[in-house]
Image (cartoon, rainbow, N blue to C red):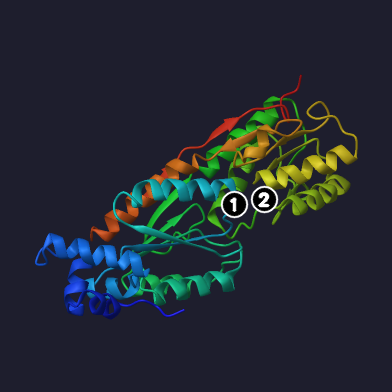
């Protein structure tokens, strides 16, 4: 199918292409009547504006690229909603790309967004990200960058983080107060600050209780349901825990699967706390204790930081969003 151009509209209306271009841009040098005629004809013919070309003519783009590890996670989808709540009324369009927790895909996503001349990039790192040249490229080109949730502190950009340390500390402290003695931790890759902070919060609570951090009770890279199931089985074989703090709700879901197979009573014989407050956490049985991340608020803060950068304010502050513990049936002893 032939792409409709400005020339096609001009020919239909017997005006010059420059008149059509100015009319579509809302230029007041063109009469209101002509602007209305051009707009109507453009709709009739199915004309679609080349946003990239238009942004190049203006010298800036109203399109913002956003790279997330997984769009199907409740946390990331809520952050996206928060971002759009601020960016869209401000006249910006959001383009969302998934890295799929894959470094190569993350690099390709950045290359694609840069090639399309986006006005700024919002990024949450994949679990595989351990090199950062592709992110430095964004900075070196003068493109505004806002990192959120999973960030690299060494990269000079705006950053919006959760208070992962406090969330993990409160979750572990709750398990200790509930009377559990051997509390395991199923975490994510500690090369990422978010998961490292959750491990540190867990460790602080354990140490404050006068206990030692046991390597046998700690399992890294367990943030999916399948990984959580596998990890808790291995930890139970080698360390005999009676509770677990998981760095993600999907991991906790895998733990619950394994515990049910073993016919362990929850929470009487085993306590479980997750992180993220995914929608399923209050629908499953038993309901899952978890840590709320306030994702929508994070999204609004991310968008606000981006707008400040776009306005040329070189906004590089680090903002921390509070977390809170939600106690449900999986961890409170009856």
Q: Quadrant of the C terminus?
A: top right
- Tell me how many marks there are: 2
The answer to whether 72 appears left or right of 284 in the picture is left
Quarter location, residue 93: bottom left
Q: Is residue 62 above or below residue 248?
A: below
Q: Is residue 48 visible?
A: no
- Labels 1 and 2 touching (C-beta < 8 A): yes
Q: Residues within 10 Å of mark 1 (few under 14, many from 20)?
A: many
Front residue of this view, candidates 66 and 203? 66
Q: Position of residue 156 (x, y in %)?
A: 37, 63
Which residue corresponds to the image point at 51% horizontal and 37% vertical from the top-left? 323
The answer to whether 307 appears left or right of 264 in the picture is left
Label 1: element kind: helix
Query: Which mark is on residue 260?
Result: none
Label 2: element kind: loop
Which residue corresponds to the image point at 41% horizontal and 50% vertical from the top-left? 83
Which residue corresponds to the image point at 78% horizontal and 43% vertical from the top-left? 255
Q: Position of residue 88 (x, y in %)?
A: 35, 51
Quarter location, residue 262: top right
The answer to whether 31 appears left or right of 69 in the picture is left
Front residue of this view, candidates 288 and 80? 80
Read off the residue under disc 1: 195
Q: Is residue 307 above or below residue 208?
A: below
Q: Is residue 248 above or below residue 283?
A: below
Query: Label 1, label 2: how many angstroms apart (C-alpha)?
Result: 6 Å
Q: Is residue 169 visible?
A: yes
Q: Is residue 60 above or below residue 324?
A: below
Front residue of this view, candidates 84 and 171? 84
Q: Position of residue 257 (x, y in %)?
A: 82, 42
Please tell me which of labels 1 and 2 falls first in the chain: 2
Read off the residue under disc 2: 187
């Amino acid at each position: 199918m032939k792409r409709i151009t400005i020339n096609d509209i001009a020919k239909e209306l017997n005006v010059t292409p420059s008149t059509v271009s100015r009319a579509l841009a809302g230029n007041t040098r063109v009469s209101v009547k002509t602007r209305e005629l051009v707009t109507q004809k453009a709709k009739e013919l199915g004309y679609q504006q080349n946003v990239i070309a238009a942004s190049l003519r203006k010298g800036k783009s109203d399109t913002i690229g956003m790279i997330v590890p997984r769009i199907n996670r409740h946390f990331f989808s809520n952050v996206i909603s928060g971002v759009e709540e601020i960016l869209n009324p401000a006249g910006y369009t959001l383009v969302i790309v998934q890295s799929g927790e894959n470094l190569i895909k993350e690099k390709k996503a950045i290359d694609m967004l840069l090639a399309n001349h986006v006005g700024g990039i919002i990024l949450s790192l994949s679990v595989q990200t351990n090199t950062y040249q592709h992110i430095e490229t964004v900075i070196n080109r003068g493109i505004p960058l806002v990192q959120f949730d999973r960030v690299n502190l060494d990269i000079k950009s705006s950053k919006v983080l959760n208070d992962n340390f406090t969330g993990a500390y409160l979750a572990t402290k709750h398990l200790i107060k509930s009377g559990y003695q051997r509390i395991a931790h199923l975490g994510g890759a500690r090369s990422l600050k978010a998961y490292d902070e959750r491990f540190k919060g867990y460790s602080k609570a354990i140490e404050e209780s006068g206990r030692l951090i046991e390597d046998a009770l700690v399992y890294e890279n367990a943030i999916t349901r399948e990984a959580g199931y596998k990890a808790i089985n291995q930890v139970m074989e080698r360390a005999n825990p009676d509770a677990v703090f998981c760095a993600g709700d999907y991991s906790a879901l895998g733990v619950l699967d394994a515990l049910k197979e073993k016919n362990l009573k929850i929470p009487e014989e085993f306590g479980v706390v997750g992180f993220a407050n995914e929608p399923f956490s209050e629908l499953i049985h038993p309901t899952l204790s978890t840590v709320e991340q306030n994702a929508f608020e994070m999204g609004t803060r991310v968008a606000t930081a981006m707008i400040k950068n776009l306005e040329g304010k070189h906004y590089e502050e680090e903002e921390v969003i509070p977390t809170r513990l939600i106690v449900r049936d999986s961890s409170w002893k009856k």
